[in-house]
């Protein structure tokens, strides 16, 4: 390698490193400056391109045209238009589309624009009008308040109140929604609308560490309970982070109890992916504070399903609900199977269901979560 080529390599590395530092600075500087945090009542993100609210894949059949709809966001644009999972979309506004061009075609639409989507359904050609949504709006709950409380620096969570909260003097159970790694409190907070806002106060904390890949690659907010630098699997720092993050989650709950009419001393936790893991961790570390938790697609550290941790759940009668998808390619279903086995052997009240789903909150998981809310979260509120 010549001296000039070495110099060029050094410059490239320096530029790349600088870009990452800038990204991290923008992502993390929100703590003192509230960057990426607007005031309550305003949209959380800038305007985006058109959004259909569906996942797609190339058809795995001899009919190679178009894309097959694999998942539809409940309440999203495709759902509102009447599209169904399994539909094969092969035209948008009369122009043919396929797996290579579909995303670009969707991006070219504007929020609020009506487009004609032609699908093949059960051998029949159907044209459906669809009004494109806006990603930043579709993926946040309808109407929420944001509060700031002190961590090591300024942290945030959002709260979604029941529809009758303003006109009522009742108290409501508190349900904590925990988001996955690289997601956000707003993205997963939208689940409150799907679960049903009646009779429950929901809060969704934001994890303290920026997740650079989401900011850098997708230009979207993404947060994690763990810092972005590489930690080995047996790093002793993990239990420290777990304890701090669990403490932060309960601090958000405590703050919400000061601000709102919350019933009972215990909270209920529902988490997805990393959030599911922290539902398990929070209950293991502080079982006296948790009435029940729902963990979907969790990573389960062995330490939290052994010995004293399980005894604490049993002693405090914490009811556990686990769910996992057979097609989850992010976290192995064996995580949940191992947790269920340990809990059943320890005599803990544990309900575990397996679904033919991927890693996302599919409609089957939402239905199971609604069942959990009806059985474990809302009834205790009436008794207290």
Image: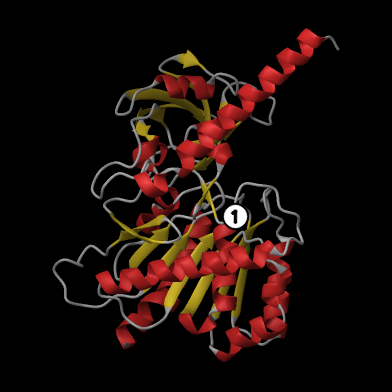
Within the image, what quadrant is residue 275 found in?
Answer: bottom right
Q: Nearer the viewer, residue 54 or 258?
A: 258
Above or below, comparing residue 124 to residue 150 in the picture: above
- Residue at screen point 56% across, 34% down: 21
Residue 186 percent across, percent down from the top left: 40, 49
Q: Nearer the viewer, residue 295 or 126?
A: 295
Q: Give the residue displayed 30% in from the left and 83% down from the top.
A: 382
In the image, residue 241 lies at what x, y percent?
60, 63
Secondary structure category for the residue under label 1: loop
**Residue furthest to the right:** 1
- Given the current orientation, which residue lies at the most extreme bottom position? 315
Q: Quadrant of the C terminus?
A: bottom left
Q: Quadrant of residue 308?
A: bottom right
Quarter of the figure that contains the N terminus: top right
Q: Pinpoint residue 175: horizontal percent, then vertical percent.
A: 40, 69
Relative to 340, residue 108 above or below = above
Q: Is residue 320 visible?
A: yes
Q: Residue at x 29, y 28 (%)?
A: 112
In front: 49, or 312?
Answer: 312
Q: Which residue is mark 1?
A: 226
């Amino acid at each position: 390698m010549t001296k000039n080529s070495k110099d060029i390599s050094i410059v490239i590395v320096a530029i790349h490193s600088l870009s990452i530092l800038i990204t991290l600075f923008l992502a993390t500087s929100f703590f003192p400056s509230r960057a990426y945090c607007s005031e309550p009542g305003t949209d959380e993100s800038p305007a985006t391109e058109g959004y259909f609210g569906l996942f797609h894949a190339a058809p795995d059949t001899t009919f190679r045209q178009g894309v097959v709809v694999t998942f539809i966001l409940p309440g999203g644009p495709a759902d509102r238009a009447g599209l169904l999972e399994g539909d094969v979309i092969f035209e948008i506004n009369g122009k043919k589309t396929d797996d290579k061009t579909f995303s670009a075609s969707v991006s070219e639409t504007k929020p609020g624009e009506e487009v004609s989507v032609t699908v093949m359904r059960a051998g029949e050609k159907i044209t459906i009008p669809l009004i494109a949504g806006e990603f930043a709006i579709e993926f946040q709950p309808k109407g929420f308040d944001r509060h700031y409380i002190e961590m090591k620096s300024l942290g945030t969570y959002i709260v979604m109140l029941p529809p009758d909260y303003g006109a009522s003097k009742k108290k409501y159970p508190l349900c904590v929604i925990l988001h996955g790694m690289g997601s956000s409190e707003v993205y997963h907070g939208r689940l409150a609308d799907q679960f049903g806002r009646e009779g429950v106060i929901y809060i969704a904390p934001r994890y303290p560490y920026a997740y650079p890949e989401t900011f850098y690659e997708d230009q979207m907010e993404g947060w994690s309970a763990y810092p972005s630098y590489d930690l080995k699997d047996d790093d002793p720092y993990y239990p420290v982070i777990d304890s701090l993050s669990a403490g932060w989650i309960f601090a958000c709950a405590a703050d919400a109890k000061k601000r709102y009419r919350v019933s009972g001393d215990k909270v209920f936790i529902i988490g997805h992916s990393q959030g599911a893991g922290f539902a398990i961790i929070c209950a293991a570390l502080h079982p006296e504070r948790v009435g029940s938790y729902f963990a979907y697609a969790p990573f389960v550290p062995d330490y939290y399903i052994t010995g004293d941790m399980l005894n604490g759940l049993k002693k405090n009668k914490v009811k556990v609900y686990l769910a996992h998808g057979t097609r989850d390619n992010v976290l192995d279903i064996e995580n949940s199977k191992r947790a269920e086995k340990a809990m059943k052997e320890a005599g803990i009240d544990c309900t575990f269901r397996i679904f033919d789903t991927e890693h996302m909150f599919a409609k089957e998981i939402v239905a199971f979560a609604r069942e959990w809310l009806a059985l474990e979260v809302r009834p205790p509120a009436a008794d207290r």
